[in-house]
Image (spheres, rainbow, N blue to C red):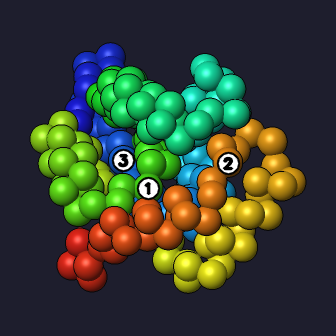
């Protein structure tokens, strides 16, 4: 990426899209916030938007129904900011390789660097963290142990080659 400034060509730094991979309770949002500060990135955490728009006490069906439109809107805003040279963090979990590949492909077509960050935590630790935050933290959506068990079965951990 290059631009002209007063007759001189100035090389602009290529923006980076960070994909945070992991299940609820793994520490995705904590990591996303670190990247936000360290890399001057725009961070997108769907739960924050869902709570702001719909409140904290959503049943699972409603929460699931609103997540996709929120993420689609976040992606539109993310792409716009990436095209302006800003780093972006998507704190979405990216549970399947197909989903991860889709966003990597779109970002690379835009000339953007992509970094995938996988946060791997044992199922017992996930439940411990999720149950503790449900009791103590405002601003998080309630997750039942059955939800976490079901999601763990659907989750496709990234392969070594995918993380390179």
The residue at the point 76 percent across, 54 percent down is 134
| The quarter of the displayed image where residue 117 is located | bottom left
Question: Label 2 crowding class (10 Å Cα cut-off): few <14, some 14-19, many 20+?
Answer: some
Q: Is residue 76 left or right of residue 103?
A: right
What is the CA distance from the residue labelled 2 to the residue labelled 1?
16 Å
Q: Is residue 132 above or below residue 75?
A: below
Q: Is 44 displayed left or right of 159 in the figure?
A: right
Task: Give the percent coordinates (x, y) of residue 161.
Answer: 21, 78
The residue lying at 27 percent from left, 60 percent from top is 96
Which residue, given by chain and number where applicable, does mark 1 sit on? 93
Residue 17: image tag:
3
Residue 154 vertical position relative to residue 125 in the rendered view, above or below: above
Q: Badge 3: how crowded within 10 Å, few (<14), some, or many (20+)? A: many
Image quadrant where one finds the C terminus: bottom left
**Which residue occupies 32% across, 17% down?**
6
Q: Position of residue 136 (x, y in %)?
A: 86, 54
Q: Secondary structure at mark 2?
A: loop
Residue 12 in sight: yes
Q: Are marks 2 and 3 in contact (CB under 8 Å)?
A: no
Q: Quadrant of residue 66?
A: top left
Front residue (pair 16, 158)? 158
Query: In this rendering, which labeled residue sits more in front, label 2 or label 1?
Result: 2
């Amino acid at each position: 990426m290059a631009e002209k400034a007063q007759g001189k060509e100035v090389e602009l730094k290529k923006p980076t899209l960070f994909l945070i991979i992991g299940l609820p309770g793994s520490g995705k949002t904590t990591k996303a916030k670190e990247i936000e500060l360290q890399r001057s990135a725009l961070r997108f955490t769907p739960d924050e938007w869902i709570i702001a728009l719909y409140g904290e006490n959503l049943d699972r069906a409603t929460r699931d129904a609103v997540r996709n439109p929120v993420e689609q809107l976040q992606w539109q805003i993310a792409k716009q900011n990436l095209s302006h040279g800003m780093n972006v963090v998507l704190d979405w979990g990216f549970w399947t390789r197909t989903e991860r590949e889709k966003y990597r492909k779109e970002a690379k077509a835009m000339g953007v660097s992509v970094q995938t960050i996988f946060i791997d935590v044992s199922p017992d630790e996930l439940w411990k963290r999720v149950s503790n935050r449900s009791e103590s933290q405002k601003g998080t959506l309630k997750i039942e142990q059955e939800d976490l068990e079901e999601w763990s079965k659907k989750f496709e951990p990234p392969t070594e080659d995918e993380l390179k």
